[in-house]
Amino acid sequence: MDDADDDTLMRAWVQGDARAFERLYRRHEGALYRFVRRLLGNAAGTQADEVFQDTWARVIQARERWAPQGAAFRTWLFTLAHHRAVDCLRKGGRELSVDDEGPGDDDDRDPWARWPEAAAAGGAGIDPAEQAFWRAAGRRLLDCLDALPLAQRSVFLLHHEDGLALDELARALGVGFETAKSRLRYAMAKLRGCMAAHLPTGDAA
């Protein structure tokens, strides 16, 4: 069963195999928690554990009526988490600017062109300055992501954390394809602009 796909494990769990649920949980817990934590952002990050646990509770509650409906289990799981996070933010009095689609920076130039090679960051004997650079860049990216409007942050995370194609993403969020596409485009543009401020100064070598 270790190599079984998610739908097979879910069907086995519905039929009473508790080990199948344990495998599903272990398979997705890390990615789901990262998604929830980044979706909630710094302001509501302390509620990540609650949203994470509530998401799995909803999976358990839906066990008897669950059936594949064209979406992968992982997509369904992340969508449940998204809805629960939105509920959490609303209950906390957060103003959700879901219609903030811009303005975005449509400059297609690569703002990372002068950064050190990313591959070097995982190698042995990395230069300490480059290591410090990439650690700072990672923190910067999380800050930039936190600054996005919720709708754009949701689309970006579902696309990059869950790997959803745009048509799947639109169905999961209940929005039109063009809406999902524009939100992702604006999210990427804003992240480029935000990260560009972290570029090293001076001319490229």
Image: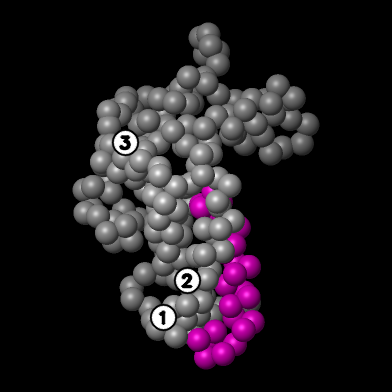
Residue 156 visible in the displayed image? no
Residue plotted at (40% across, 25% down): 193
Q: Nearer the viewer, residue 72 or 154?
A: 154
Q: Residue 58 carries which label?
A: 2
- In the orientation shown, which residue stands out farthest toward the bottom? 15
Distance from the alpha carbon under mark 3 to that under mark 2:
32 Å
- The location of residue 140, given as percent across then percent down, is 55, 29
Residue 20 among those drawn in magenta:
yes
Give SS at disc 1: loop
Residue that sits furthest to the right in the current view: 125
Question: Secondary structure beneath disc 3?
Answer: helix
> For mark 2, does the 10 Å Cα neighbourhood hold few (<14), some (14 to 19), or many (20 or more) residues?
some
Type of amino acid at the residue the image marks with label 1: Trp
Q: What stretch is highlighted in magenta?
A: 12-38
Report, in whole angstroms, how far the alpha carbon at label 2 lies from the one at label 1: 11 Å
Rendered-image quadrant of the C terminus: top right
Tell me which amino acid carries mark 3: Tyr
> Which part of the image, by quadrant, shows the N terminus?
bottom right
Please give the count of numbered marks on the rendered protein: 3
> In the rendered view, would you say 33 is above or below 148?
below
Q: Residue 46: x, y in percent?
A: 58, 47
Residue at label 1? 66
Q: In this view, does 39 lie to the left or right of 171?
A: right
Instruction: Determine the residue positioned at 58% across, 78% down.
Output: 21
Which residue is labeled 3 in the image?
A: 186
